[in-house]
Structures are given as structure tokens and as C-alpha cells.
Image (spheres, helix red, strand yellow):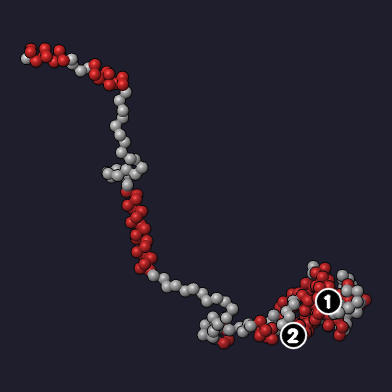
């Protein structure tokens, strides 16, 4: 894209009617809304022109950029179809010229009251008393929210029950408790044959028992 010349006197800075139509077309391609008529785009274009006049550099960017678009389109940018025009703007989206148009378009196109009506925006509410008593929830394209009442007593009872259950489970297995979690009753240990034989050898024989009784 051809940048503005460093010497403002060496270039034509007049904004022709054709250039104005190119600007309107640029805004329409950059911000497409099939339901929008031409009027909001034309008003936005005029506001961009008025803002650019306040700065020599911005004015040069605007006038020279609009002229360059016809050269990029190899004819007339206004007559280019939407796909071709969008591709051309995509190629210059990083330039100061396009950034100027994009920034001023966002600020002005969506501040147009006709656009507000088309988009369903009712405008600022402060000077009208706010939205609370003016249908703040009258949107018909959102589902109705589910509203439930908060029951503090039920919440407290449920929490108390949960705490009681935790205390009961925690007391098992503590000192003094008759229940040992995870410790089933164990059978007595089995005695080995050697131990059984040893114990039997320590017992008195029948004869020894008889002698003891006679002696008594």
C-alpha cells in the first residue's frame, strides 16, 4: 500500500466523492451487518472524515489510503465483491490507514442510535432511572433462570448430622473402646508338637501319684 508522502504539498489531499464512497464500502466490509442500511455507515464515514481533518498526518493517511485501495483492486474497490474486498482489507490490516478507520469505526458506528435500535440496545439507563423498574429482565431470547430458596435450617441440620456421623466413626478403635475397627477376634495360637511333648514330660506319672498318696 502506498504510504503518505513526506511532503504534504506534493500529494493531492482532496477527498473526492469517489473516495467517500470507498470509505463507506470499507466500513461495510470491515463491519458487515446485513440488517444495517447505508445510513449508519455513511454517518460513520463522515465522523471519520471530521476526526481525520484535525490531524495532518491522519488526513494524509485517510486520503492516500483510499486512493490506494482502487489501485489494489485493479479498478474500483467499490465494485469489488465482498470476498475480494475482504481479502484486500486483510492484506492491509496492519497499516496505519486501516487501523485509523477501524478505531474510529468502532467508536462511532456502534454509538449510532439507529444501530442501537437495530441491535436491540435501549441506550444508557442512568438518566431514565435505571433498568430495575424498566424491564431489566424482559429479554425473550434467554432461558428463565432457576431460582431456589436458601433453607438455613435444613443446611444446619444436614451439617450437624454429617458431623455426628464423623464423630461416631472416629471414636471406634480409640482407647477404652470395645470395638476395634479392622481387628477381628484372633484365635489362640496353636502349640507346636514339641511344646506339647515337653509339657507332658513335666507331668507326674501314675506311680508317682500313688506313692504320694500312700505317704500321706
Residue 32 coordinates in the image, percent (x, y):
74, 77
Task: Please indicate whether residue 105 sits to the left or right of residue 194 in the image.
Answer: right
Mark 1, other Cα within 10 Å: few <14 / some 14–19 / many ≥20: few
Q: Name the residue under label 2.
A: 37
Secondary element type, mark 2: loop
Question: In the picture, residue 84 is in which quadrant?
Answer: bottom right
> Which quarter of the rendering shows the N terminus?
bottom right
Circle number at residue 3: none
Question: In the picture, residue 182 is in which quadrant?
Answer: top left
> Which quarter of the rendering shows the C terminus?
top left
Question: In the picture, residue 161 is in which quadrant?
Answer: bottom left
Task: Please indicate whether residue 164 sits to the left or right of residue 69 in the image.
Answer: left
Q: Name the residue under label 1.
A: 81
Of 73 and 126, the residue lying toward us: 73
Residue 174 coordinates in the image, percent (x, y):
31, 44
Which label lies toward us, 1 or 2?
1
Residue drawn at point x = 57 percent, y = 87 percent: 128
Note whether residue 97 is visible.
no
Residue drawn at point x = 42 percent, y = 73 percent: 149
Relative height, residue 182 to residue 47 (above, below): above
Residue 83 coordinates in the image, percent (x, y):
81, 73
Of callouts 1 and 2, the N-terminal one: 2
Of 47 and 144, the residue lying toward us: 144
Mark 2, other Cα within 10 Å: few <14 / some 14–19 / many ≥20: few
Amino acid at each position: 500500500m502506498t504510504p503518505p508522502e513526506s511532503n504534504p504539498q506534493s500529494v493531492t489531499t482532496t477527498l473526492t466523492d469517489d473516495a467517500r464512497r470507498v470509505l463507506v464500502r470499507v466500513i461495510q466490509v470491515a463491519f458487515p451487518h446485513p440488517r444495517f442500511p447505508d445510513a449508519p455507515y455513511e454517518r460513520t464515514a463522515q465522523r471519520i472524515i471530521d476526526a481525520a481533518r484535525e490531524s495532518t498526518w491522519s488526513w494524509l493517511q485517510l486520503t492516500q489510503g483510499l486512493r490506494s485501495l482502487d489501485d489494489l483492486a485493479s479498478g474500483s474497490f467499490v465494485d469489488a465483491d465482498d470476498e475480494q474486498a475482504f481479502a484486500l482489507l486483510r492484506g492491509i490490516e496492519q497499516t496505519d490507514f486501516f487501523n485509523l478507520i477501524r478505531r474510529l469505526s468502532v467508536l462511532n458506528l456502534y454509538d449510532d442510535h439507529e444501530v442501537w435500535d437495530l441491535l436491540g440496545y435501549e441506550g444508557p439507563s442512568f438518566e431514565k432511572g435505571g433498568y430495575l423498574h424498566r424491564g431489566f429482565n424482559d429479554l425473550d431470547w434467554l432461558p428463565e433462570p432457576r431460582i431456589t430458596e436458601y433453607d438455613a435450617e435444613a443446611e444446619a441440620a444436614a451439617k450437624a448430622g454429617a458431623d455426628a456421623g464423623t464423630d461416631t466413626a472416629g471414636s471406634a478403635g480409640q482407647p477404652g473402646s470395645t470395638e476395634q475397627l479392622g481387628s477381628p477376634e484372633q484365635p489362640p495360637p496353636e502349640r507346636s508338637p514339641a511344646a506339647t511333648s515337653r509339657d507332658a514330660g513335666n507331668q507326674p506319672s501314675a506311680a508317682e501319684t500313688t506313692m504320694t498318696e500312700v505317704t500321706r
